[in-house]
Amino acid sequence: MLCAQRDSAQALAVDPIRFPRAFTRGDDREAVAVLAALLAYGRVSAIGAAAAWVTARLGDAPGAALRADGPEEAGARFEGFVYRFTRGPDLARVWLGLGEVARAHGGLGGALRAYEREGGAESPHLLPHLTRLHDEVLTGGARRLEGLSAAARVRVEGGAGLAHLWSNPRGGSALKRLNMLTRWLVRGPDEVDLGLWADLGAARLTMPLDAHVFRAARALGLTRRPAPSWAAAREVTERLAALSPSDPLRYDFALAHLGISGDCRGRRVEEVCARCPLEPLCGL
């Protein structure tokens, strides 16, 4: 009922998935989706401004730019970017590493499919794939730095914000942004998600626990854990899989925008809660 009532078009107007959806080619959508997802932390309006700045710098063919850019081009492309913890050199370092991956595997989705063939198919979720991608991006980016002068390296090497931008899946965090990226690219294609990597299986996705979804999940009794973590994300996913085994993340977009829209305040507000289809199940 919640999914049916949510106005997808209105929600899409503020959701960061609007940036890859503005392109039609698969490789362009992949390239834009990765950066838009990685920048999806903080307030929705600020995320939109940051992702809009970056997308404008990628040009009309982001997929081709990803494969073609060397250190000089990457440094210039993101020069001057500042968003909270992230700076231009952090983006440039990840961009160079993603380019190495895309060239080696024929695209970012090609990399995950290669990991799948090499043993990841045994996993019920995509954490092993994300871990391999994390390592390959950092290794590939490091290769592109070899032989650069100190002045050239500072524009593309990344700094204190790199570890936040490109999170290590081994840390046990909820991996909200990477899980959101895989939702965008594995689910669908439908009115929201892109379905470019649909063959990896929507049943293996993990819930992106942003603040809104985590708050709703606790209110609905989907987890009792006190903070978002990988364990909490898997717990919420498994509870939702009982309702939709083949597509547990079908509820994510609606739950997230329940909070983003202000239709859920995170506390009991009678005139707001009375309109919510989840009110009979909610513990707020």
Image (cartoon, helix red, strand yellow):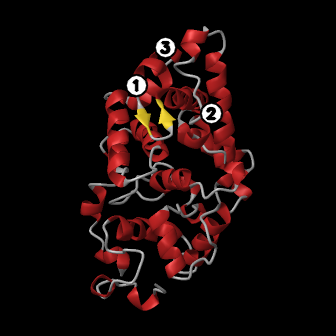
Relative to 14, 232 lies left or right: right
Q: Amino acid at mark 3?
A: Glu
Residue 15, label in figure: none
Judge by depth and name the residue closer to the eye, 159 or 172. 159
- Name the element at disc 3: helix
- Name the element at disc 1: loop
- Mark 1–mark 3 Cα distance, whole angstroms, equals 14 Å
Q: Nearer the viewer, mark 3 or mark 2?
A: 3
Q: Position of residue 37 (x, y in %)?
A: 46, 47
Residue that appears at 46% across and 41% down: 84
Q: Position of residue 88 (x, y in %)?
A: 47, 28
Judge whether 123 appears above or below 263 on screen.
above
Residue that appears at 29% across and 61% down: 11
Residue 137, label in figure: 2
Relative to 18, 281 lies left or right: right
Q: Amino acid at mark 1?
A: Gly
The earlier-in-sequence mark between 1 and 3 is 3
Residue 24 showing in the rendered view: no
Q: Nearer the viewer, mark 1 or mark 2?
A: 1
- Mark 1–mark 2 Cα distance, whole angstroms, equals 22 Å
Please tell me in which quadrant of the rendered image residue 256 appears: bottom left
Q: Position of residue 196 (x, y in %)?
A: 46, 48
Residue 268 showing in the rendered view: yes
The earlier-in-sequence mark between 3 and 2 is 3
Q: Amino acid at mark 2?
A: Val
Q: Position of residue 221 (x, y in %)?
A: 56, 82
Q: Exactly how many numbered labels are in the figure?
A: 3
Q: Nearer the viewer, mark 1 or mark 3?
A: 1
Residue that appears at 37% across and 38% down: 25
Residue 72, label in figure: 3
**Residue annotated with mark 1:** 80
